[in-house]
Structures are given as structure tokens and as C-alpha cells.
Amino acid sequence: MSGLDQDVLRHAISTAREHGFRTVKLRVGDEKFRATLGEVQESSSEEAMIAQDMPLELRSSEPQNLEVTAPVVGYFRQGKLPLEAGRVVETGEALCEIVALGIANDVIAKGSGEIVEVMIESGEAVEYGQVLATVRTK
């Protein structure tokens, strides 16, 4: 692995953990690397982390609108299935990608439901926290 040597992989994983990402994907030429990281919890905010990661349908029984936001600054790219109104999504499903510095970052659904609005198109630049779509939870 000339382009994806161990130092590059360690740095990518370290950076992902530092910023709270759960997936690392790297590609240099024909070489590809993907890793899914375990959750890191701080003891002082353990209850907040558990509540944040709890599926939305367990926190509330009433339908809600959940915003899908960009986890990083980059460019929007569709996933395997297009991000479009009417599509039903499940908690933990990769909805689309934000490409930052050549690294694709999955945007993960934080709740199950139906996409009711999409506010982005492929190739558009996005900012951290920008709302990409709205999901009406089940």
C-alpha cells in the first residue's frame, strides 16, 4: 500500500475518533480502506451520550421531524440509494455522503421514517451542520 501506508491509516482513524466520526473511508488511486469505529464515551457525559445515541423511536412515541445534517464541510454526494422525498429510511442507515478532502463521510439516519424534504443536490458544497433533508419519524 504505497498511498495508504500505516501512518496515513493511523492518522485518519485518530482524526475520525477525535471528531466523533463512526466510519472512515479512504481511497488513493485503486487502493481503498474502510473502517467502522466503536463508540467512545466520556464518563462525565455518559448519560447524555446514551440519550443522544438512543434511536428516536425509543425516546418519543409521537411523530417528529428530524433534520439530517452534514457531519463535515465538503461536497454532497448521493449514496447507493438517492436521497429523495418519499424514501423510507431506518435508524443507522447511510443516507448519503459528504466528501471532504477526498474522504467520503457517511451521513447516518438518526431515526426511522420517511424523507419529506431534500434541500441539497449532488455536487453542492455544504457546511458543517447544514440541513440536508428532513425525515418524519415513525
Image (tube, rainbow, N blue to C red):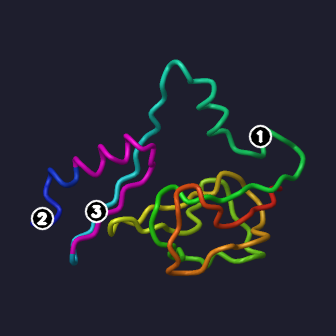
Residue type, numbered disc 1: Leu
Whole-percent x and y of residue 99? 42, 68
Q: Residue at x 48, y 25 (%)?
A: 42
Q: Earlier in the sequence, mark 1 or mark 3?
A: 3
Residue highlighted by disc 1: 58
Q: CA distance from mark 1 to mark 3?
A: 34 Å
Tell me the CA gap for discs 3 and 2: 10 Å
Q: Which residue is mark 3?
A: 33
Residue designated by label 2: 1
Q: Are marks 2 and 1 in contact (CB under 8 Å)?
A: no
Does residue 44 sit above or below 104 in this rendering? Answer: above
Between the residue at mark 2 and the residue at mark 1, the CA separation in whole angstroms equals: 44 Å
Relative to residue 20, is residue 90 depicted above or below?
A: below
Q: Which residues are magenta?
A: 10-28
Who is closer to the viewer here, 98 or 27?
98
Q: Quadrant of the C terminus?
A: bottom right
Give, as a three-letter code, the residue at label 3: Phe
Circle 1 crowding by C-alpha within 10 Å: few under 14, some 14–19, many from 20: few
Q: Secondary structure at mark 3?
A: strand
- Mark with earlier residue (2, 1): 2
What residue is drawn where x is 87% and y is 52%?
63
Q: Position of residue 20 (x, y in %)?
A: 45, 43
Q: Quadrant of the N terminus?
A: bottom left
Q: Residue at x 27, y 69 (%)?
A: 27
Secondary structure beneath dot 1 equals helix
Residue 81 within the segment the image draws in magenta: no
